[in-house]
Amino acid sequence: MVSRSRLKSLLTGLALYTMAAAMVGYFGVNAYTGKYGLNARQELDQEIIALTSELARLKRERLEGEQRVSLLRSDGVDPDMLDERARYQLDYVNPRDLVKIVKPK
């Protein structure tokens, strides 16, 4: 009878340590790969870098567009810009222009 209670207490202790180790392992794995884990933080940092560079590119593009629009304002129209836009929209070419026809592939 003494051997059974000793075996039972040994198995109970072993089961408790195994469950504790499994819980620590579970939380450890989630701390690394979970939604808010270390791995996710690295991915978020990479995404932040990519979006920051895209934002800088879009700001430059916007400034270029604003500059082109400012050249077309009625108070100070740039003749070259007006000529370029009119030719583009009306599909006209100056007789002195060199036109290169590119066939689509």
Image (tube, helix red, strand yellow):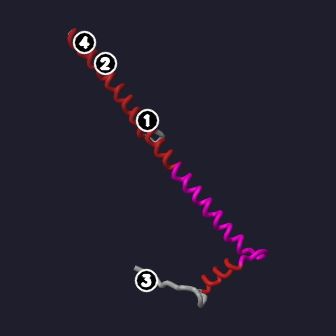
State which mark lies toward you, 2 or 1.
1
Report the residue at 45% width, 82% height from top: 102
Which residue is under mark 1? 31
Which residue is at the front of the view, 82 or 89? 82
Q: Is residue 17 above or below residue 67?
A: above
State the separation of the CA atoms marked 2 and 3: 80 Å
Give the amino acid at mark 3.
Lys
Pointer 3 or 4: first along the chain: 4
Q: Which mark is residue 13?
A: 2
Q: In this view, which residue lies farthest toward the top?
A: 2
State the separation of the CA atoms marked 2 and 4: 11 Å
Give the amino acid at mark 2.
Gly
Pointer 3 or 1: first along the chain: 1
Which residue is under mark 4? 6
Q: Is residue 97 visible?
A: yes
Residue 20, picture quadrant: top left
Horizontal side of residue 41 vs 28, given as left or right: right
Q: In x, y percent, where is residue 75?
A: 79, 75
Report the span colored magenta: 49-78
